[in-house]
Amino acid sequence: MATIKVTQTGSPIRRTKDQRATLVGLGLNKMHKTVELEDTPSVRGMVQKVHHMVSVEE
């Protein structure tokens, strides 16, 4: 299955609880941390929700 690399580039400080929870759900909790995830519609939806705090590499 295809994978994507998601890197946290923004801080969750002063963000809503659901955006913080989305970052935790993606496996991100610190700045500049990178995780490799399967490219599924649910993961894409989570990335879209916090697109201003992450960068994505195909």
Image (cartoon, rainbow, N blue to C red):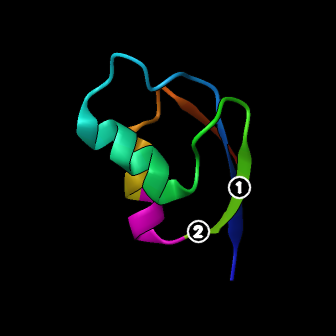
**Residue 18 in the figure: left or right of residue 46:** left
Q: Please name the residue that numbered disc 1 is placed on.
A: 35
Which of discs 1 and 2 lies nearer the camera? The answer is 1
Location of the N terminus by quadrant is: bottom right
* Above or below: residue 25 compared with residue 13: below
Judge whether residue 41 is colored magenta: yes
Whole-percent x and y of residue 19? 33, 38
Location of the C terminus by quadrant is: bottom right
**Residue 55 in the figure: left or right of residue 33:** left
| Magenta span | 40-44
The image quadrant of residue 54 is top right
Whole-percent x and y of residue 6? 66, 48
Whole-percent x and y of residue 27? 57, 56
**Residue 6 in the figure: left or right of residue 44:** right
Judge whether residue 35 is colored magenta: no
Q: Check disc 1 and give the amino acid type.
A: Val
Which residue is at a point 46% across and 45% down the rendered structure image?
Answer: 23
Q: What predominant SS class does the magenta segment belong to?
A: helix
* Above or below: residue 48 compared with residue 3: above
Q: Check disc 2 and give the amino acid type.
A: Asp
Q: Nearer the viewer, residue 27 or 5?
A: 27
**Residue 45 in the figure: left or right of residue 9:** left
Local secondary structure at mark 2? loop
Q: Could one spot residue 18 in this view of the protein?
A: yes
Which residue is at a point 37% across and 39% down the rendered structure image?
Answer: 20
Which residue is at a point 50% across and 72% down the rendered structure image?
Answer: 40
Whole-percent x and y of residue 42? 39, 67
Mark drawn on residue 39: 2
